Image (spheres, helix red, strand yellow):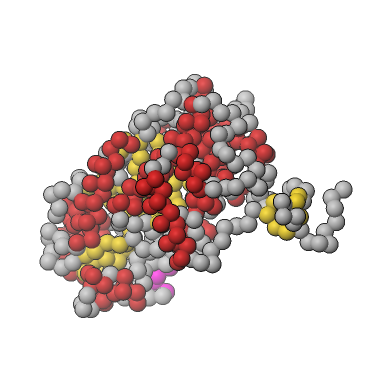
Amino acid sequence: MDPSSTTTEIPLLSFGIELEGVIAFHENVIRDHLMRHRPGYRLVKEVSEKLEPSLRSPRYKQIRYNSWALEKHSGKPLPYSEEPLYIARSLVCSNAEAPDINIHSGDNKLAKFKSWYLSPEPNVPGIARLQLQNTFARCIGAMNEDCWDSWGMEIISPPYRANQIPSFQKDFMALTNSLQNGNTKNCSSFAGFKATDSCGLHVHIGLPDGSEWPVTVVKHLAYLTLVYEDTINALLHPCRRSGDHVNAELKSNRENIYTAGCEDDPFELPDGRRVRGNYRALSRVRADIYGAQDTFGGRTALEKIVSLLSPNRGYRIAFRPLLRPEASGRARTVEFRQYAGTLDHAEVRSWVEFCLKLVRLAWRYADEGKQEGGCLVQNWMDPINIEDLWEEMGMSEEEKRSWRERRNRYADIARDWEPDPLWEECNEDEPESW
């Protein structure tokens, strides 16, 4: 059945999170694990500059490997694979109130997550040796930092329904509190967990049965994503707005509509300045999105929209999971990847609710039969105001106040940050178009 012909009545949505972080642990803890579970392996604490590149993840060759290594029977040193995950799991299992948690260290993602999981995250490096004590001062204290190591990992939740947010928050608190407290069942030494500036919080939004979305809903969400990208970015911690990590892993969803002023004629702003737009005119963007149709023997409308907003991996909002085939068993979701990693349960909850409300808004526009988008912004010269979006999303005054405070706090941290300009002034000598 063509998804665009199915009902768009707003359903009960589901969500799941992936939280990146770094676990730090004392040498005694990892040695204890090796003795119990990896007999024959020894710890390699001295990783030379010559050896280090060989320990990097094949997928993230640009990410330096900052952790210790393992060696079996005097063979080639190897990076950690899952060993620190068992330290983390031991921390969680020491708390009777924490949810069940398992480990997945394979190369392929699980099709379904029926419990919480811990997984390696090679995109997040361990802490460089010189910064380790400052980063984990609470754990290390006056101890010798040379006896401590760290490693990047990811916490993955099972799906929760949108009406289960309190249960999710309770589980998240119990789990992350256990990781931060740092006393394991098997060893009197300590460990700890933090979300550093290179860590992200990813929120997946989908349907409880993992089924496909109506294309009309995707179209509305795509347009809202493109229009409000900058104003949503202003709500994020500055570490998620710019830098090498952002350029590689958090590319703009506007990338494919960026024209650098090469497509359209100059136009005049209300203040009299002549400018060229840096992005494709919104009228053309709407034609591309809302006019997308299945092509017989070619791409579907959904494939065309996904290709426009996130043709491959590494975008702020990932639409590609919507293309997962039913046979894969994996849920069709939209992944909001731009938020900074945090252990603050209230902040995590507010971002989950933000993502859910934005998707519900797209669903409402589709349910109301709006063909060209219910979005108030129809031209790049229109005011693009996050307050208008919040109003459409149905945010409470308390929620708005909280987001304003966060936006203002981050604005004070990054006073020099400016979004990419929507247009550039024309050179006075530039000739008129023929």
- So how many labels did they put on this image? 0
- Residue at the spot 63% in from the left edge and 31% down from the top edge: 291
- Residue at the spot 60% in from the left edge and 57% down from the top edge: 420
Q: Is residue 112 above or below residue 180?
A: above
Q: Main secondary structure of the magenta part?
A: helix
- Residue at the spot 40% in from the left edge and 70% down from the top edge: 52
Q: Is residue 54 left or right of residue 44?
A: right
Depth check: give the residue in front, 250 or 351.
Answer: 351
Q: Position of residue 423 (x, y in %)?
A: 68, 54
The quarter of the picture where residue 165 lies is: top left
Q: Position of residue 414 (x, y in %)?
A: 48, 66
Q: Is residue 349 left or right of residue 420?
A: left
Magenta part of the protein: which range? 50-55
Q: Is residue 189 above or below residue 369?
A: below
Q: Is residue 350 left or right of residue 188?
A: right
Q: Is residue 295 above or below residue 108?
A: above
Q: Position of residue 114 (x, y in %)?
A: 27, 39
Depth check: give the residue in front, 375 or 163.
Answer: 375
Depth check: give the residue in front, 266 or 254.
Answer: 266
Q: Is residue 276 visible?
A: no
- Residue at the spot 18% in from the left edge and 66% down from the top edge: 190
Q: Is residue 183 left or right of residue 350?
A: left
Please say whether residue 51 is one of the residues in the magenta stretch: yes
Q: Position of residue 365 (x, y in %)?
A: 51, 31
The residue sitting at the right extreme is 434
Q: Is residue 294 visible?
A: yes
